[in-house]
């Protein structure tokens, strides 16, 4: 992976993480850096899944890949919120 690929992954991860937080109702008590990390991981995993399904490279916008990434980020943010708030209580 080149530097531009890493920078692109960070930017896409930031956007995916923020979209996931906006789609989840209520307040998520996790730091923004954790949202970014979740978004980056979700973007990478979503791309891998889309590649495995053969829908990663289509003409125009890769909607299926984008939806996979957002769904994975939502799941990640929900899990992180549950685990992060549980660790704050203990």
Image (cartoon, helix red, strand yellow):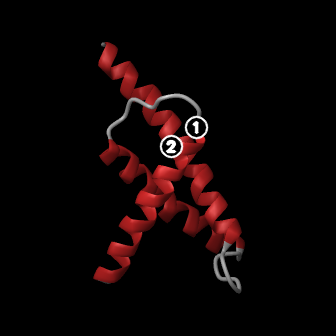
Q: From the image, tell me which residue sits under label 2.
A: 21
The residue at the far top in this view is: 90
Q: Are marks 2 and 1 in contact (CB under 8 Å)?
A: yes
Point out residue 13 in the picture as x, y percentages from the top left corner. 43, 60
- Secondary element at tag 2: helix
* The C terminus - image quarter: top left
Q: Quadrant of residue 64?
A: bottom right
Q: Is mark 1 on a helix, strand or loop?
A: loop
**In the rendered view, does 24 fall on the left or right side of 84?**
right
Above or below, comparing residue 79 to residue 57 in the picture: above
Is 70 situated left or right of 34 in this image? right
Q: Of 27 and 33, which appears nearest the observer?
A: 27
* 3 vs 18, nearest the viewer: 18
Which labelled disc corresponds to residue 24? Answer: 1
Image coordinates of residue 85 in percent, x first then y, are 38, 23
Quarter the N terminus occupies: bottom left
Residue 36 marker: none
| Residue name at image x 50 percent, y 62 percent | 43
**In the rendered image, the vertical position of residue 74 relative to residue 28, given as above or below:** below
x and y percent of residue 18 in the render? 47, 51
**Residue at 31%, 19% in the rendered image:** 88
Between residue 60 and residue 54, name the one nearer to us: 60
């Amino acid at each position: 992976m080149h530097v531009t690929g890493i920078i692109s992954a960070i930017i896409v991860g930031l956007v995916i993480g923020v979209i996931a937080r906006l789609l989840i109702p209520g307040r998520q008590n996790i730091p923004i850096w954790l949202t970014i990390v979740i978004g980056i991981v979700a973007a990478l995993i979503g791309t891998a899944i889309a590649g495995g399904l053969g829908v990663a490279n289509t003409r125009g916008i890769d909607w299926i890949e984008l939806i996979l990434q957002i769904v994975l980020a939502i799941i990640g943010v929900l899990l992180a919120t549950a685990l992060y708030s549980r660790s704050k209580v203990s």
